[in-house]
Image (cartoon, rainbow, N blue to C red):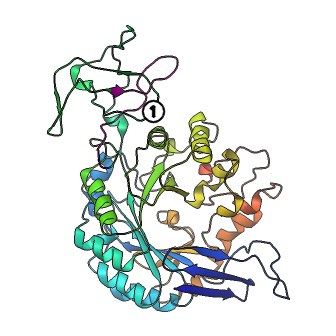
């Protein structure tokens, strides 16, 4: 189904394919209907709404998120509030039908564990709004996956893994060239299947080693990634033959959810947060095909110091790893698509050369999208969920009123007044108004309002 929308106030048109997610937007049209080539700044009603239907998180409360190194921006470890009611959700849908193309369902927890999960998806479909959501996979079943296939545009599974939890800081070995490398203990010796690359290789002469109940032969061929100077381990993991991903560094429920969704025919993406504690691993997975087989895309999300998010995990544009990461994206070829949240756009602009400008858009918060909490507070962006600086209560009001409110206009003013002398300002608008320290830019023209 092709949905069309014309914004009379801001003078531009849109088309959205509800089957494959293709979205097209014209530039601002002149009095004769001719495209001026100028991107519209905003829409008269959000095209996409991020709806926090979940008020509490079983995955977070269980401690599994924290165990994986996750720094939840929704503070799911400590916050427990009621989920959004079905009646409130229907109220949102009723106002949005014929205006809004998509819902990103989320909040503080796994949407597929909402008590009215199927009814929520069905009501979206009945009103021609495409629902998408993200899950940790903890409670995913074949039945839920099939429901997703029936109603959803796409489902993302959050990939939380910490190779540094299983990799010793200095792990060395004896190479066939005679140079000596010594493990700290036999328990630190990793078992690897062959990487498909051109790095050094050798055989180990050691007993069988048991990990997660499976026995691995030490006389198999092993490949290791070494730095040029110190020849220390940088990255390694046990590879699952079916998925080409680590068996012992990603929770089984995550992998099981990915496989169930793919097997059900759902467009399945990976959501991967990049911060100081994960960017090394992200680089490794991109280099050595360390993402699940059969996925549609990997969507990289920028870490923000919100909720449980720590300040020292914020990426720095001057970090060589940041440049290496974006260079891999810019020059590499992958068996899946690559996507980013719009928070990462300043980094894309400053660190890539081959990504078409038409394929990126600046922060859409308060311009083309918004967030609604489980207790019916409207925000320009979900990352304001802790401070609630720009919140508008719509319990007894309309989304349209929040969209046109002074709070939302104040949020937009940051875009309109930031970096006035930058040649790329309309592609970036100064980045995130909520956490300015996350803006990946070091230009002299950087002037955040």
Predominant secondary structure, magenta span: loop
Other residues around mark 1 within 10 Å, as few (<14) / some (14–19) / many (≥20): few
What stretch of residues is rendered in magenta? Answer: 222-242
Left/right of residue 206 with respect to residue 290 in the rendered view: left
Percent position of residue 147, x then y: 30, 77
User: Residue 416: x, y in percent?
Assistant: 75, 67
Residue 392 image-quadrant placement: bottom right
* Residue closest to the eye, 329 or 335: 335
Front position in the image: 46 or 226 = 226
Give the quarter of the figure containing the C terminus: bottom right
Left or right of 155 on screen, residue 28:
right
Residue 190 rendering spot, x and y as whole percentages: 28, 28
Quadrant in which residue 429 is drawn = bottom right
Residue at horizontal 32 percent and vertical 14 percent from the top: 182
- Relative to 407, is 225 above or below? above
Q: Looking at the image, is 268 positioned above or below residue 355? A: below
- 142 w.r.t. 346: above or below: below
Residue plotted at (32% across, 59% down): 258
Q: Residue 83, can we see it?
A: no
Q: Position of residue 131 (x, y in %)?
A: 43, 77
Q: Is 335 in the magenta?
A: no
Residue most extreme to the top: 178
Q: Residue at x 47, y 92 (%)?
A: 94
Q: Which residue is mark 1?
A: 197
| Residue 229 among magenta residues | yes
- Nearest the camera: 364 or 371? 364
Indicate the secondary structure of the residue bearing disc 1: loop
């Amino acid at each position: 189904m092709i949905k069309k929308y014309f914004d009379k106030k801001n003078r531009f048109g849109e088309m959205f394919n509800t089957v494959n997610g293709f979205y097209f937007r014209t530039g601002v049209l002149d009095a004769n209907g001719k495209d001026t080539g100028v991107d519209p700044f905003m829409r008269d009603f959000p095209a996409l709404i991020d709806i926090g239907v979940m008020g509490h998180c079983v995955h977070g409360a269980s401690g599994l998120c924290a165990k994986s190194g996750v720094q939840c921006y929704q503070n799911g470890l400590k916050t427990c509030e009621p989920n959004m009611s079905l009646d409130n959700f229907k109220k949102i849908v009723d106002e949005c039908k014929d205006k809004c193309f998509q819902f990103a369902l989320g909040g503080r927890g796994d949407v597929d564990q909402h008590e009215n999960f199927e009814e929520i998806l069905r009501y979206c479909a009945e009103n021609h709004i495409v629902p998408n959501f993200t899950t940790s996979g903890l409670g995913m079943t074949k039945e839920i996956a099939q429901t997703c296939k029936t109603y959803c545009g796409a489902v993302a599974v959050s990939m939380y893994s910490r190779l540094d939890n299983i990799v010793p800081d200095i792990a060395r070995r004896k190479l066939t060239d005679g140079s000596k490398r010594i493990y700290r203990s036999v328990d630190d010796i990793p078992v690897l299947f062959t990487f498909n690359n051109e790095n050094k290789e050798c055989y180990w002469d050691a007993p069988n080693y048991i990990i997660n109940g499976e026995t691995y032969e030490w006389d198999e061929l092993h490949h290791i990634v070494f730095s040029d100077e110190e020849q220390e381990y940088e990255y390694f993991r046990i590879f699952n033959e079916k998925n080409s991903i680590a068996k012992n560094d990603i929770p089984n429920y995550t992998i099981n959810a990915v496989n169930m969704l793919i097997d059900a025919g759902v467009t399945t993406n990976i959501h991967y947060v990049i911060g100081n504690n994960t960017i090394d691993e992200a680089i490794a997975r991109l280099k050595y095909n360390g993402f699940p087989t059969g996925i549609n895309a990997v969507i990289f999300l920028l870490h923000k110091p919100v909720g449980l998010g720590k300040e020292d995990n914020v990426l720095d544009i001057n970090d060589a790893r940041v440049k290496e990461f974006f260079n891999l994206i810019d020059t590499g070829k992958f068996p899946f698509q690559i996507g980013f949240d719009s928070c990462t756009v300043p980094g894309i602009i400053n660190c890539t050369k081959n990504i078409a400008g038409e394929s990126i858009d600046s922060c859409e918060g308060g311009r083309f999208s918004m967030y609604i909490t489980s207790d019916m507070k409207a925000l320009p962006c979900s990352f304001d969920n802790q401070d609630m600086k720009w919140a508008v209560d719509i319990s007894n009001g309309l989304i349209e009123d929040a969209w046109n409110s002074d709070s939302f206009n104040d949020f937009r003013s940051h875009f309109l007044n930031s970096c006035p002398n930058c040649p790329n300002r309309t592609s970036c608008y100064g980045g995130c108004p909520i956490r300015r320290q996350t803006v990946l830019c070091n230009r002299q023209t950087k002037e955040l309002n």
